[in-house]
Image (cartoon, grey):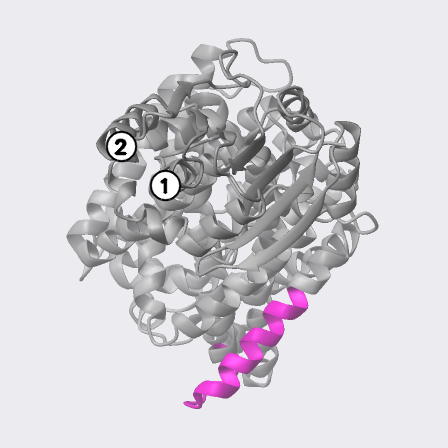
Amino acid sequence: MARLRKVLSYPVIILLTINAIMGTGIFFLPAVGARVSGPASILAWLFMGIVSIYIAMLFAELTALYPKEGGIYEFCKQAFGRFWSFLIGWAALVGGNITIAMLVVGAVQYLLPIPAYLPKIAVSIIFILLFNYIAYRGMQTSAVMLMVFAIITLGTVGMVALGNLFLFSSANMRPFFVGGSLPVTVFLIAETFFGWETATFLAAETKDARRVLPKALILGTTIITVICLTLVLASLGSIPSNAFGGSHAPFTDLASRAFGSVASPIFTLLVYLSIIGSVAGWIVAAPRLILAMSQDLLFPRQFAQIHPVNQTPHKAILLQTIVSIILVFAGAGNYESLLAMLVPLILLMYSAVMMAFIVLRKKVPKRVYYTAPGGKVGASLVILLFLSLIALWLRITPGAMQSLRLVASFMLLGLPVYFLVQAYYSPHFFSRIKDILARSRTVTEHLEFPLWVRRKATGLLGDLEGKRIMEVGCNIGTLTLHLAEAARGGAVYAQDDSPGEILLVQERMRQYGHRHVQVFLEEHHIHKRIPRVDAVISIGGLSQADDPKKLLQDIAKRLPKGGRAVFVEYDRFFHILPNVEWVNDQDRLQALFRSTGFSMQMQRRQGLLWRYVFIHGYKT
């Protein structure tokens, strides 16, 4: 089985961490801070820098504890269990893919400030396809690309910062306090330091990740803090804060002041490449989150497959490509509202990670590789800071409540995905859901299991009059009623693993006067009171069985030679979600049936919402 390859060394992961954290904010937010707080905005940058280094320490402890590709999802899974970890993973996926779509279009707009819609969309899609292809080719190729972008970003910011330090004038720092709100400034600049989660997704491909990643997170955040403080100090000392805060292209103005107007086009291109580099970092890292969720069966497990040559989660990369392209089209004209939505989403996500830190400190008290100072108290203070920033965001941001409702709607969209996947992969969960929905499903039973499917399945059994029929997995009795009519003069033995559905089937049989039908509750095996029968039929029972071979052996014991068995399975649910792989593998099914004493044939028929697979055989 192919696995992710550990190819990232300490120097490489430091650069990748810097690329993940240092986003686009450093190019625009120093001017925003200067506009609100003037020269005193340097205090907000200092505060956020210190806080960010401490948060990196908390992330470092969690990463040393669980150095896996799921990153923040893995932390929350260990702390809270499957449901809440799914929501955190879902939030990260939603936020990340919106970021990809919005930033890549924003970068194109930065380079090509033209009103034409289609050319910008086309260029954006080209970049998405290119970066996802590089991600598909392997982590070594991706690492080279991300290192180049990190060096470009560090070099661009460093040159402008140093160039403006030589032009520093203390007069530009007076008056230091101009009446602006420092807490507001902290909120506005905080996004510059976000991105620790992206680095944690690369743990499975980092050499000696328990030791290396914690150091890389802390050192990378420290380097970013020093560079940001240097740039902000140089900016405020080089250009008066009122002029700097009012600039529409502050970084370009700084570059022009330090190196002359001839440098403006060059630095415009470098800023563009830095923004694109931030997008590339997420594109490379995010499929590892999909991979981790798929491995835990909280996402379709087909996305857990790793390419045998490239050692990349190629199907997860393909999914990300499709989603990002859709968002490029769907989000056109709504970039500001979608980007505003990311603020509370990211802050809530980080708050959940800090809460996971507190829980894991209690669950796993022993730390071997790294222990963050402050522990539970420090993490609690960080949570208070994040919640305060959300409250501040609600107070000062126009349309904040609308954005918050949009966040809630995206999160609620994950709930049906969770329940669908859980019902699909977990027989016990599926049984509980069937219990709850038993009576309501009678309304949709003819859509779920239409008459033509029932006729097709029973037709494969032949003439049933006077025969004894066993139905494995009778659900709410839709097919049981059909079998009861066809097998008059004989008997029908139906079983299921859902108590609620069994009661409903018994009630329906009494209602229609089918006294020749007996219904049994059984979870794992054929019920011991079911005698030998002439034919067997099962809807979805083969793919849901814990041991399909054992199920076929039990069925074979109750059939005479020549007795027929029919299995109806669902595939391509809602034309997207596939069934277990072997249901469509005819050679594998032939071998399975042959080993249990059956011949086997397969037919497929497309339904409205899914494909039906008819598997039928004779006991040989």
Q: In this view, does 584 lie to the left or right of 27?
A: right
In the picture, the disc for residue 571 is none
In the picture, the disc for residue 478 is 1
Identify residue type, mark 2.
Answer: Arg
Quarter of image, res 432: top left
Helix, strand or loop for disc 2? helix
Identify residue type, mark 1.
Answer: Thr
Q: Is residue 286 left or right of residue 587?
A: left
State the residue in front, 580 or 189.
580
The residue where tag 2 is placed is 508
- Do we see residue 167 in this rendering? no
Percent across and percent down for residue 574 are: 46, 56
Percent across and percent down for residue 70 are: 57, 36
Helix, strand or loop for disc 1? helix
Q: In this view, does 595 lie to the left or right of 53?
A: right
**Residue located 44% across and 32% down the image:** 85
- Do we see residue 480 in this rendering? yes
The answer to whether 308 is drawn above or below residue 265 in the figure is above
Quarter of image, res 594: top right
Please tell me how many numbered marks the rendered image carries: 2
Percent across and percent down for residue 145 are: 72, 60
> Which span of residues is magenta-colored?
110-131
128 inside magenta stretch: yes
Q: Residues within 10 Å of mark 1 (few under 14, many from 20)?
A: some
The answer to whether 476 is drawn above or below residue 451 in the figure is above
Q: How crowded is mark 2: few (under 14 residues within 10 Å), some or many (20 or more)?
A: some
